[in-house]
Image: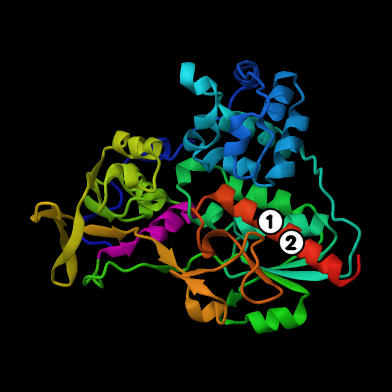
Amino acid sequence: MATPDIASRRLAAGALAAGFADLRPPLAPNEARIAAERCLFCFDAPCVTACPTSIDIPLFVRQIATANVEGAARTILDSNILGGMCARVCPTETLCEQACVRAAEERPIEIGRLQRHATDRLMESGIQPYRQGPSTGRSVAVVGAGPAGLACAHALAVAGHAVTIYEARPKLGGLNEYGIAAYKTVDGFAQREVAFVLGVGGINVVHGRRLGAGLTIDELAATHDAVFLAVGLDTVNRLGIEDALDGVVDGVSLIADIRQASDLAAIPIGRRVVVIGGGMTAIDVASQARRLGAEEVTIAYRRAAAQMGASPYEQRLAQTDGVLIRTGVVPRRVIAEGGRVVALEVERPATGERLTLPCDQLFRAIGQAIVADEVAPLAIVSGRIVVDEERRTSRPGVWAGGDCVAGGDDLTVTAVEDGKRAAASIDRALREASGG
């Protein structure tokens, strides 16, 4: 991939390290206490309603304020077993913190950082508050070890069911390990959290098994009492224009490469980069391209800024990094020379004006879909699995959750809630089937 137009080692090691340092550093104990004491401990607190996993936020904040940090962590983890990661990557500015009554008068309680303070302290202590429940004699297959799969597996193990996780990749964690900007979760936290989740016991892990590649729903249903699919999305949407060129890359691939790199300087990045899309993937790709040394980075998005999937905070973060966000532009043509991308031509539909955006690297970040053959014959809509409120699919005995299901918003916290809901439904179904 390295060409004269690709910059792979322009930044000094110190500059690279600074660009990928912790985005939101942890609170010191005294800072946490002061931040917690600002909370009004509302009755019927709106922040709880705004949390997809319904964490009792006033309770855990009060526990921090009274120096019961372990209790605070238990309050969080009882509702969201991946509360440590969610504290780092949740768009709290549009969820719990936006709903905080303090936000109207000054600034909201720092719920995300307080949540991180409590969960980090518990995990660092080595305390494991969860244990596998008494055996029910039932087994459940969980396909995919991302947030939804891990949350479901943990809840099922606590309920006493034997769980086998089938994971295609070498590491567990899904997007928490492979799909989140490196500066949002540093120091191998994703794998520490995975180890904490598996510490409950009763969860067997089988690596190298991918649905559709020698592993079928029929096989899983025949060897387990229930199946939960948390397979994520594995195909990146195409642009609908010619883009099979050198220098045109899937955005999710760059994010994964950065997360797994032992030497960030070895990752080739263009001098002039264009990212197509408006969601979190587009923002993460663009910001990290700048931090890797790209001189010009432009996001091209077809709608208005208010319609971007990325929150206003994330948009401002990218702009602070030096990313130019162009809205209301539709890709019309990828321009190439010698088989390599040199520019993207876009159009403003409102006026018909066409612009040429020079680039030596073009990243697609316009969404993903599931491979339908892998989940046949389940009901699929718009490239995702159809489920009901309990996350049951169209096939009896098979549930699904996370990014692979229709109607989701591609957040870690909502994937965790999917896993929780599915686990509760599976547990209920298995107990009813056995007369329990």
User: Circle 2: is it few (<14), some (14-19), or many (20+) Cα within 10 Å?
Assistant: some
Residue at numbered disc 2: 425
- 142 vs 253, nearest the viewer: 142
- 176 vs 354, nearest the viewer: 354
The disc labelled 1 sits on which kind of residue? Answer: Arg
Whether pointer 2 and pointer 1 mark residues with C-beta atoms closer than 8 Å, the reply is yes
Residue 414 appears left or right of 9? right
Q: Is residue 103 above or below residue 188?
A: above
Residue 360 location in percent, x, y? 20, 58
Q: Quadrant of the N terminus?
A: bottom left
Residue 229 location in percent, x, y? 62, 68
Q: Is residue 265 magenta?
A: no
Q: For the residue labelled by badge 1, is the local secondary structure a helix, a strand or a loop?
A: helix
Q: Residue at x 63, y 51 (%)?
A: 417
Q: Quadrant of residue 319?
A: top left
Q: For the residue labelled by badge 2, is the local secondary structure a helix, a strand or a loop?
A: helix
Q: Is residue 370 above or below residue 75?
A: below
Give the CA distance from mark 2 to mark 1.
6 Å
Residue at numbered disc 1: 421
Which dot marks residue 238? none
Q: Is residue 258 magenta?
A: yes
Per the picture, the main secondary structure of the magenta-coloured stretch is helix
Residue 115 appears left or right of 404? right
Q: Quadrant of the C terminus?
A: bottom right
Residue 137 location in percent, x, y? 89, 70
Q: Which residues are magenta?
A: 247-261
User: Circle 1: is it few (<14), some (14-19), or many (20+) Cα within 10 Å?
Assistant: many
From where the camera sits, is residue 106 visible? no
The disc labelled 2 sits on which kind of residue? Answer: Ser
Residue 33 location in percent, x, y? 66, 18
